Amino acid sequence: GLRTAVRDLDSRLRILNRQIDKLQKELKAVQSARPRQRYQAVIDVEATADGSFQPVVSYVVNHAGWKPLYDVRLQKDEAGRAFVEVGYMAQVTQDSGQDWDAVKLAVSTARPAINQRLPKLHPWYVDVPRPIRQPERSRSQAKLATVSMSPVAPESMPSPAPMAVDADIAQAAVEDSGSSVRFVVPGTTTIPSDGSPHKSTMQHFRLEPKLDYLAVPKHTDAVFRRATVVNESRTPLLAGAANLFVADEFIGRTKLEFTPVNDEVELLLGVEDRITVERELTRRDVDKRLFGDNRRLRYAYKVTLKNLLETAVSVELHDQIPVGRHEQIKIKLEKAVPEPTEQTDLNLMEWHLTLPVNEEVAVHYEFMVEYPRSMQVMGLP
């Protein structure tokens, strides 16, 4: 029938679109390809005695670079202890015009100082605006309309697919010169001159995590898993993208900031469904008593957390009460059980809680809002 014909046409259209995308990529690669260039090195040698030597020539090429990439996995050992496994990789891109075939690859954070000059400072002037003389316009010019154009934001690029950790990976040799770090990738590597990213694993190591959980029930009923680890590896963790896994499940991506050796880094490793949180408004009262020309409102909230895991866990609960932006709007936390561990000047509150196995823990708090009866306020529930 008609529906079957429409489905067949949709299927054929998808196949044709995939073929068009493939051909467009091939055309782009052909158009961007540059003619191969050949260079000749002339080496003058002055020998003080007979013998043989093997010259090694090093040179700088354009259109080549690398950036760090990580695979971070939260796993458990045979005893049930959690650990974080980190795959430290180099994502190398080069379009130099020459394929790097079975080369010994090393990547470094140093920058080659080729043809660099010290920048000069020029006078920095501060002045008053000078009047600009407007050119006289003809009558015909005065009748012309002006059309303005606004820039269009570029479309966001799709995220790359997650990269799995390779098994039995050799470790890169690390050379730390103080100002830069150099990784020598084990074995040989082939990087074609195609401008595409190619992954090489440099290191593989484990870190001991401190696990706890975060809850922000005002915005979501999800409870997030957090791992705080100390960088006990031999090298700093350079800033770069990280693929996150819990066991074999890919849970998302994040960006690691630069982390020196022995510094801490926090990782959010997805949602823990076996810890639940619920936030509810239990009271909203308008005080009937007179307080001059002021109106008083009282609110009460209850946050309930439950732990369905097999062990007790630590949870960091975040919540808040309003902040007045007018001098006549007064807000006060009147009661909290238990008391918040921290409360900022902007009324952001934080509790550090321990949840026993299969038990509920409740947090109650009440606050008062006072403002003139003649004033209209917004932002209250």
Image (tube, rainbow, N blue to C red):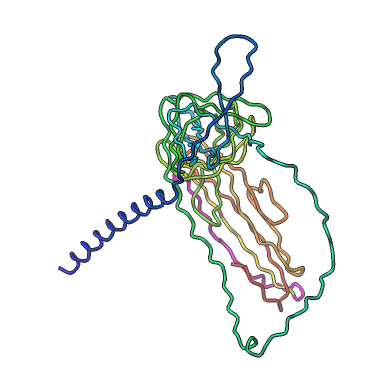
Residue 292 lies in magenta, yes or no? yes
Task: Please indicate whether residue 105 sits to the left or right of residue 28 in the image.
Answer: right
Number of labelled discs?
A: 0
Residue 360 appearing in the image: yes
Residue 244 appearing in the image: no
Q: Residue 226 in the image: x percent, y percent?
A: 54, 41
Residue drawn at x 55%, y 21% as measured from the top left: 55
Q: Is residue 54 above or below residue 306?
A: above
Q: Residue 106 in the image: x percent, y percent?
A: 54, 29
Residue nearest the viewer, comparing 205 with 88: 88
For this orientation, the residue located farthest to the bottom is 139
Residue nearest the viewer, comparing 186 with 228: 186
Residue drawn at x 18%, y 64% as measured from the top left: 4
Q: Quadrant of the N terminus?
A: bottom left
Q: Residue 19 in the image: x percent, y percent?
A: 30, 54
* Quarter of the view holding residue 262: top right
Q: Quadrant of the C terminus?
A: bottom right
Looking at the rendering, the stretch of residues picked out in magenta corresponds to: 273-293
Residue nearest the viewer, comparing 324 with 127: 127
For this orientation, the residue located farthest to the top is 50
Residue drawn at x 64%, y 48% as measured from the top left: 350
Residue 248 lies in magenta, yes or no? no
Task: Please indicate whether residue 124 sits to the left or right of residue 164 in the image.
Answer: right
Residue drawn at x 27%, y 61% as measured from the top left: 13
Q: Residue 86 in the image: x percent, y percent?
A: 50, 32
Q: Is residue 252 above or below residue 280?
A: above
Task: Please indicate whether residue 188 sits to the left or right of residue 151 in the image.
Answer: left
Q: Is residue 27 above or below residue 250?
A: below
* Quarter of the view holding residue 378: bottom right
